[in-house]
Amino acid sequence: MRVIVVGGGVVGTMHAWQAVERGHEVVQIEREAEARGASLRNFGQIWVSGRAGGEELDTALRARELWERIGARVPGLGFRAIGSLTPVRGAREHAVARAAVARPDAAARGYRLVTAAEARKINPALRGDFEAALWCERDAAVEPRTAQLHLHEALRASGRYTFLTSREVREVVGPGAVRDDHGDVHRGEAVVLATGAWLSGLVRELVPDLPVRRVRLQMMQTAPLGEPLTTSVADADSFRYYPAYASPALDALNAGQPQEPVAAAHRMQLLMVQRQDGGLTIGDTHEYEHPFAFDTLEDPYEHVAAVAESFLGRPLPKIRHRWAGVYAQCTDTTRVVHRQQVADGVWLVTGPGGRGMTCSPAMAETTANELGW
């Protein structure tokens, strides 16, 4: 079988990986010189802890297994089974963490409530003030800015993979066939459109009422910290954002302890991951209203830096990079991904939201199984 994958980000690349692993030939087409969207502009977290139960958690756990397996074969991914800590302060935040540990699926997530002293033993860089922390053993990380490069290199070694860049697919011209803006036609038994947040052009023509929206976020990266940050770190505002933490205790937190005004205005949480060069990726904000701003705002950066510093108990290193990114999210946010046959032999896979980096291997595996690859 020959599979055409449109889109060079992590979702597209994992579909290419699944097809090559199953013995098929793959042509992957990317409209930029290399992937430059949400697949690079993220934390690189394999984030199990906050996922909703049921299908979403099952998908995340399966993806976590696949990431570890692929990481063993592709060391350049920088796969690290580092887990995560969410430090808590005060009775309300503590209650949400206790409710999470009481979930029936807490063991599958690797949840455990630890004291501040235990948290510092797990992650000695956390020298700030907090009373306890929610530990999630199943969380992990990869290097988002380089992962696609190493995956493509591994795919090329199969001898059944071609990666074409600077080509925009413009038209479906037959069953399993598309034409790019160079006029070249690419034919196969299946086409997967994994175009991320690019929802205009061909995608809009094929699915004018696509139930997917775009979300913008701001993030930043520091110079090397000078010591290991041995886990990912989140703050209690992440309880408000991720569905796994829904509980009466969360309702009480929201009612009795509102977010800081800047955090509320920009729908913020702290997520912090150390890169292999020692720098910290820190964020993030969420913007849903279109049209998006074209600039980045300083207040959210100041807020998230202050929260990070309060956990570290020290000033952050110099900020070296600031950026904005856009990802695609199903308007029904309980859906893990939007997967739809849009033409004969052509499927669209988009809308994973913030789950894209985490869940992409399992999403691609499901596509491959459903299409009988």
Image (cartoon, rainbow, N blue to C red):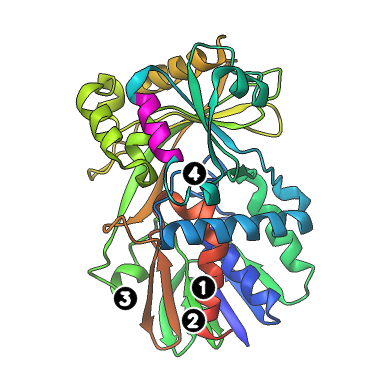
Marks 3 and 2, how far apart at CA? 21 Å
- Who is closer to the viewer here, 142 or 3? 142
In whole angstroms, how far apart are the C-alphas of marks 1 and 3? 22 Å
Q: Quadrant of the C terminus?
A: bottom right
Secondary structure beneath disc 4?
Answer: loop
Q: Nearer the viewer, residue 255 or 163?
A: 255
Image disc number at residue 366: 1
Magenta span covers which residues? 93-101
Where disc 1 sits, the SS reads helix
Look at the numbered disc 3 and give the secondary structure of its residue.
Answer: helix
* Amino acid tagged 3: Leu
Residue linked to disc 3: 206
Query: Is tag 1's residue or tag 3's residue first in the polypeptide sequence?
Result: 3
Residue plotted at (26% across, 57% down): 331
Q: Work out whether mark 3 precedes mark 2 in sequence or the reverse, and give the earlier one.
A: 3
Do the numbered discs 4 and 2 sit on residues whose CB atoms are within 8 Å?
no
